[in-house]
């Protein structure tokens, strides 16, 4: 009976040792100096949708609408004294206002990589450390004033149709 108990314990120890060894040897070890951006160790934090007015010649021509995902180390994120999303959105505003050459009206000329890298670098410069490793774009849009006006008119017409009111009926007089 004792032989069976000793054999069972021996089998358990060998099995656990083999599993531990196989997990340790199969873990991907980054080369020295290699970024860990897509292989763990970083948190992916998503911002809410935000809009930034686009100014040209002193007038608002439209709105930049975006949602970003950024990668940060959780230890550094927890050490921040202000909310990280507030810092990110503030830097996006600052970056877009300080770079008037970014023209969203001509989407072919927008350098998305320069936009992402510029936002990342400005955040890291402001914090004084490598806080953000990567900025990923989840959503990016530009709505001109004409687009917004057309959407407003279309929504008003749809609402009036839903209520059964003719579109060209005069407004009631009181």
Image: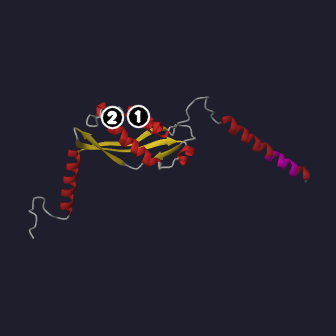
Chosen colour scheme: secondary structure
Task: Residue at 38%, 35% (x, y): give it.
Answer: 115
The mark nearer the N terminus, 1 or 2, is 2
* Residue at the disc numbered 1: 118
CB of mark 1 within 8 Å of CB of mark 2?
yes
Please state the extent of the stretch shown in magenta in the rendering.
5-12
Quarter of the image containing the C terminus?
A: bottom left
Residue 132, image x, y percentages: 49, 39
Classify residue 92 by image quadrant.
top left
Residue 68, image x, y percentages: 41, 43
Residue 4, image x, y percentages: 87, 51
Up the image or down, 173 lies above or below 15; here it is below
Quarter of the image containing the N terminus?
A: bottom right
* Residue at the disc numbered 2: 99
163 left or right of 100 in image? left
Task: Residue at 69%, 35% (x, y): give it.
Answer: 25
Task: Residue at 22%, 45% (x, y): give it.
Answer: 145
Cα distance, mark 1 to mark 2?
10 Å
């Amino acid at each position: 009976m004792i032989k069976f108990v000793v054999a069972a314990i021996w089998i358990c120890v060998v099995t656990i040792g083999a599993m531990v060894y196989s997990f340790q040897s199969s873990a991907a070890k980054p080369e020295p100096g290699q970024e860990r951006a897509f292989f763990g160790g970083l948190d992916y934090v998503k911002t809410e949708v935000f809009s930034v007015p686009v100014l040209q010649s002193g007038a608002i021509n439209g709105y930049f609408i975006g949602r970003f995902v950024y990668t940060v180390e959780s230890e550094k994120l927890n050490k921040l004294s202000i909310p990280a999303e507030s810092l990110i959105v503030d830097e996006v505003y600052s970056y877009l206002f300080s770079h008037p050459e970014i023209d969203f009206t001509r989407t072919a000329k927008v350098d998305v990589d320069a936009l992402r890298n510029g936002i990342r670098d400005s955040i890291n410069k402001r914090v004084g450390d490598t806080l953000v490793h990567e900025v990923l774009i989840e959503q990016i849009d530009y709505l001109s004033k004409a687009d917004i006006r057309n959407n407003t008119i279309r929504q008003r017409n749809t609402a009036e149709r839903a209520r059964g009111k003719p579109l060209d009926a005069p407004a009631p007089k009181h």
